[in-house]
Amino acid sequence: MKLIIKLLLNALAVVILSKVLSGVNVDSYATAIIVALVLSVLNIFVKPILVIFTLPITILTLGLFLLVVNALIILLADNLVDGFSVSSIWIAILFSILLSILQSTLYSLLEEDKK
């Protein structure tokens, strides 16, 4: 149940950011749920491989290259999901940063309700 709630919160964050950022478009709420699911799967399976391959440049940039890795994951989700589009890598980096902030805020609200 907790997994489904987190997936729906991620979809809500994707919808909110598509309304805020002009370079991100989501066609429907169902597409946002699919985007949240695809991003979760890509973060589980693809991101660790990318992090390992880019470890030297990540160390050299003191971890800032992970923003680019996150943007690449978002652009990959853009290619995999019809109805979801991101206009550039800069928008993807901004989307990644704002998505992380919004997810942590929503998750903290979820944890407060349990207490």
Image: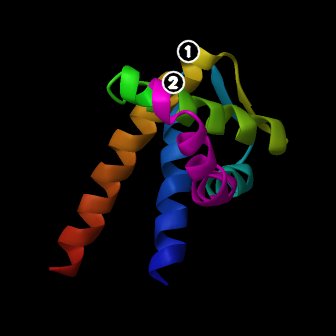
Residue at coordinates 53% horizontally, 42% vertically from top-left? 51
Give x and y (percent) for residue 20: 49, 26
Circle on res. 90: 1
Q: Quadrant of residue 99?
A: top left
Position of residue 28 relative to residue 18, above or below, is below
Give x and y (percent) for residue 68: 53, 26
Q: Main secondary structure of the magenta part?
A: helix
Circle on res. 93: 2
Q: Find numbered disc 1 in the image and state the secondary structure of the residue it sits on.
A: helix
Q: Quadrant of residue 59?
A: top left
- State the residue in front, 13 or 64: 64
Q: Three-letter amino acid code at disc 1? A: Trp
Query: Callout 1: few (<14), some (14-19), or many (20+) C-alpha neighbours within 10 Å?
Result: few
- State the residue in front, 31 or 73: 73
Residue at coordinates 47% horizontally, 59% vertically from top-left? 9
Position of residue 40 relative to residue 58, above or below, is below
